[in-house]
Structure formats: C-alpha cells, structure tokens
Amino acid sequence: MAIDFTFPDDVEDARMLVKKFMTDTVKPRMDDLRDRGAPGDEWRKVIYELRDVAKNRGLWAPHMPEEWGGMGLGITAVAAMSAEAVKTPMGPYLINCQAPDEGNMHTLLHFGTADQKEKFLRPLCEGTMRSCFSMTEPEVAGSDPTQIQTSAVREGDEWVINGHKWFTSGAHGADFAIVIARTDPDAEIAQARNSAFIVPTDASGFEIVRDVSTMGGGGGHPEIRYTDVRVPAENMLGEQGGGHKLGQVRLGPARLAHCMRWIGQIEQALEMLVDRAQKRYAHGSLLSEKQGIQWMMSESALELYSSKLMVLHAAYKIENGMDFRSEVSMAKHHVANTLWKTVDRALQVHGALGYSNDSPLAQMLISARWARIADGSDEVHLMRIADMVMRSYNETGSVNRAVGELPL
Ligand SMILES: Cc1cc2nc3c(=O)[nH]c(=O)nc-3n(C[C@H](O)[C@H](O)[C@H](O)COP(=O)(O)OP(=O)(O)OC[C@H]3O[C@@H](n4cnc5c(N)ncnc54)[C@H](O)[C@@H]3O)c2cc1C
C-alpha cells in the first residue's frame, strides 16, 4: 500500500519538540504573567527571552532553509509544527513563523535579489526585523487586485509611490512593507498592471493614518498613506508587472500556513466542547449524553478530520512541485469555515461562560471571523474552485483534476 499517513521521524520529532517547548517552557511563563497581571514591558521582555530560548534550541523559522537560519523543513513538517505552536498564545511568533513575516520571508526567498535578501530577508529570518504586506485599499474591492489604484511612477533611478492602503496588518513596528502598486496602467492583461516594492517604513511620505478599530479590537491593521514615497529602483521585488503573480505565489503557502494555525485552534475548541459537555449536568443527564450536543461533536470532528486531510494533501502537492491552486483554495475555504463553526459550537456548549471573557472562546470566535474574509474571501475561493472544476471537466472530460487528482 503506497499511501502512508504517518509523519517521517524528522517531522514527528520537530512536532514533539514544539509541543514540549510550548507546554514545559512557554505556558508556565505566560500563565504566571497573566495571573500576576504583569505590565506590558514585562510581557515584552519575557517574549524576547522565550524567542532566544527557541532559537538556541533550533526551534526557529521552520519554513526557511538552513542557510537562512531556519530549520529547512518541508511544508508538511511546518504544518505539523504550526498546528502545535498556535495552541499557545504568541506560539508562532516565538518560533518566528508568524503572519505576515512568514509569507514575506517566502516571497523574498522566491523573488528577492541577492542584495534584497541580505538587506531584508536576513534580518527577518534572524528575528531582528518585522514586516508587513500592503495591498488592500479602502476605495476599491480588495478581492480584485486588478483595481489597485496606488501608483508607482519611475523617475530616474527611483520609483515614486502614491496611494492609500488599509488593513496592512502588523504595520506598526514593522521595518518595511511589501507594497503592491500600479506601474503599468495600460498593460493589455489586467493582471500585469501591478508590481511589488520593498518600502522601508521610515521612508519620507510613509504615514500610518490610524489604527483601524475592528470587531477584534484595534492596533493590528492600520490605514496607511503613501505620499511621494521614493524608493530606489532596486527595491522593486520581482519583475515589473509581476505584482499579481507575486501575490499569488505568496498567498499559496501563506494561505496554507493560516490553515495550519487554524487547525490547532479547531482542535482546541473541540477539546473544550468535549470536556465541558462531559462535566455539565442539565435536565437529568450530562450534556454529552444529549444527542443534540453529540451531533455538535460529531460534525466538528468530521470537519476537523477533513480539514486535516485537505491541508496535508495540499502541503503534499506544494512540496512535490505540483499545481496546488485548487487544493489550497478548497482547504482555505473549508478550514476557515470549520474554525468558525467549531468555535461557535464550543461557545454554545459553554453557555454564559463561553460568552464571557473568563473563557478564551469569545475571543477565538471574534478572531475566527476574519478567516473567512482575509487571504481570499469565501466567495472568491468558491468562484475560483468552480472555475477550476469547469475547466477540468471541459478540458479532460472529468472533474478529477480540480479535486486533488487523487487515484480514486
Ligand atoms: C483581519 C484582516 C487582516 C488583513 N490583513 C491584510 C494585510 O496584511 N494586507 C492586505 O493587503 N490586506 C489585508 N486584509 C484585507 C483582505 O485581504 C481583504 O479584506 C480581502 O481581500 C477582501 O477585500 P475587501 O475587504 O476590499 O472586500 P471586497 O473586495 O469589497 O469584497 C466584499 C465581499 O464581496 C464578496 N465578493 C467579492 N467578489 C465576489 C464574487 N466574485 N462573487 C461573490 N461575492 C464576491 C465577498 O464576500 C467579499 O468578502 C486583511 C483583512 C482582514 C479582515
């Protein structure tokens, strides 16, 4: 039988190392800070210390090659590690594989020149810089990047960037942004109008207008104005007109990385649901004995199981250089919706406790909502999947190519 769903030893070892680090080292420190109501400065200090510990133990940037200070693991191993790391607050940050840096590292590795890599990728990998990705604009539909209005105009050896962005996650404290701007408004193919630029956040004309207040609070997703921001020509990332392609390449593995982190949260929510249902007694029996509650468990379990299979299969396709677009779109849609439904069910089973901030579920539910919007909203993925299903049928007489191309 050729199909083997066990991880090779190196992958399983990496997963267990992260699990042990989070459980034995990180969690006690975090619990202590929370119980003492420690101030922000102390949190920051502890987090930097824990990052050093992770780095010294070699638990660092699992998605990056060893020559860039990472662990050189394939995306399947990264999936396993991320799903463990996310169960602890700040877990992915502690091992330097948090969004958006993780996606930006991939992008720089793939598209960066040797100089760009030394200047921007190296410090990201070392954890001494932070970055953000600046594409979405308030005035036009983010789902359709061909409408981007931010412009970059060549003047001598520089590009001059003007525009307005928002939801540039992590821009506060970031050292540079990867900005998508229109360089070729007359290009015949709409997808060839944009290019990507590396813009240092201390460049003159880069202005954070405000923190956009969201249902999840504020602070994470600023609105930014670019006013006559000048960057040297060598700060173009990838080729001119290649901004769309770069976004797609970046978003493939980055979307899957989100799925990996979400799987950890789905599992955590389902475990909380199961635990609570077996302890709470109402109307003559435990909640876990009621069929209505059991169905919440079984539907969540079914969806979690299929989420894991989809993520592993999409990772397999990426790792083996195969076309992964359909599988990543399906995984992104399915896992984001499973996260939303499972956290909601767990919250329901916890009743008032679930709604309160005494349990993490309320915050988890709020945070789960963006999963269905960012990195391709539900409807855009469904649109792409339908397109790929039709193309597969029309070109091959079968839908199989668009549903994993499995030998079934
Ligand atoms: C928490 C969070 C973090 C984010 N981080 C970043 C970031 O770091 N950098 C960045 O550049 N952007 C970021 N974004 C923005 C995100 O990428 C966009 O919100 C997303 O691309 C959708 O664009 P939009 O908000 O303009 O919605 P619109 O494009 O206006 O779409 C609105 C809704 O219309 C529907 N829709 C769109 N097209 C179709 C269709 N063909 N058929 C049917 N329905 C359709 C969808 O439901 C969509 O949700 C973030 C967003 C969130 C919520």
Image (cartoon, rainbow, N blue to C red):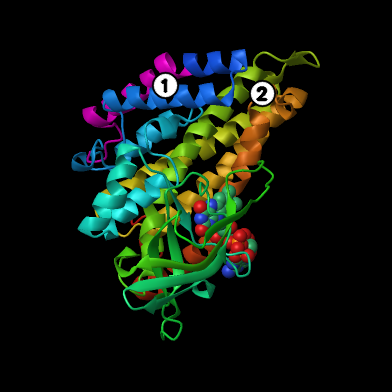
Which residue shows up at 35% across the image and 72% down it?
A: 158
Tell me the quarter of the picture where residue 23 sits: top left
Q: Which amino acid does label 1 sit on?
A: Met
Residue 273 in the image: above or below residue 73: above
The quarter of the rendered structure image containing the N terminus is: top left
Circle 1 SS class:
helix
Q: Give the range drawn in magenta.
A: 1-27
Say which of 213 and 352 sits in front.
Answer: 213
Q: Earlier along the polypeptide chain: callout 1 or callout 2? A: 1
* Helix, strand or loop under label 2: loop
Amino acid residing under circle 2: Ser
Q: Residues within 10 Å of mark 2 (few under 14, many from 20)?
A: some
Looking at the picture, tell me which residue is in the foreground, 183 or 70. 183
Residue 389, percent from left and from top: 45, 66
Residue at the spot x=63%, y=27% of the render? 360
Find residue 22 and name its label. 1
Q: In which quarter of the image is residue 245?
A: bottom left
Magenta-drawn stretch contains 6: yes
Q: Residue furthest front?
A: 204
Query: In this figure, which residue is indicated by the disc labeled 2?
Result: 359
